[in-house]
Image: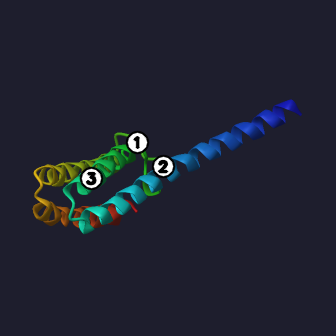
Amino acid sequence: MRKQLIAMLSASLMFSSVSLCAADLEQDMDTLNANLKIVKKTDDAREMQQALTRMRAAAQDAKQSTPEKLEGQPADSTQIKDYHAGLDSLIAQIDVVSTLAKANNVEGAKREAAKFDEIRNTNHKKFR
């Protein structure tokens, strides 16, 4: 009886940790989306910078997760490397937009922020 209980608890913990990873990636993507809306709408450089900071943190955190489509792939697989490269390109673009926002160039930052959509669409086609 005790062994069965331990086995059930172990299985339960295993499945809950898998769903936690998926929820983390989903939460990171929700954070990216919500803050992208702020970046596109705001005219306040400080608010934009705060949203970009949250976007960068979410993108960094997303690198620790694996999309469902890539579950089971080895960490050094081409697809996983491509997923990380997509996040790296997003982070690089966040840094470009952030530099403009820090310089109080909100209009230039918004023009550069338009590239986020292309990065998102390209990577969603591959990994979503």
Alpha carbons under labels 1 and 2: distance apart:
9 Å
Q: Nearer the viewer, residue 73 or 22?
A: 22
Q: In what quadrant of the picture does the C terminus appear?
A: bottom left
Amino acid type at image mark 2:
Asp
Residue labelled with disc 2: 24
Amino acid type at image mark 1:
Gln
| 49 in relation to 108, above or below | above
Residue sitting at 82 percent across and 36 percent down? 5
Q: In what quadrant of the picture does the N terminus appear?
A: top right
Residue 124, how many percent across, how many down? Answer: 34, 64
Decide: few, some or many residues near mark 2? Use Cα within 10 Å; few <14, some 14-19, many ≥20.
Answer: some
Residue sitting at 36 percent across and 62 percent down? 33
Q: Secondary structure at mark 1?
A: loop
Q: Is residue 122 left or right of residue 32?
A: left
Residue labelled with disc 1: 64
Alpha carbons under labels 3 and 1: distance apart:
19 Å
Alpha carbons under labels 2 and 3: distance apart:
19 Å
Residue sitting at 46 percent across and 56 percent down? 26
Furthest residue in direction top, as rendered: 2
Q: How many marks?
A: 3
Residue labelled with disc 3: 52
Q: Secondary structure at mark 3?
A: helix
Tell me, yes or no, if residue 67 can be seen here: no
Furthest residue in direction right, as rendered: 1
Decide: few, some or many residues near mark 3? Use Cα within 10 Å; few <14, some 14-19, many ≥20.
Answer: many
- On residue 127, the disc is none
In primary-sequence order, the first of circles 3 and 1 is: 3
Residue 51, how many percent across, how many down? Answer: 30, 54
CB within 8 Å, label 1 to label 2: yes
In primary-sequence order, the first of circles 2 and 3 is: 2
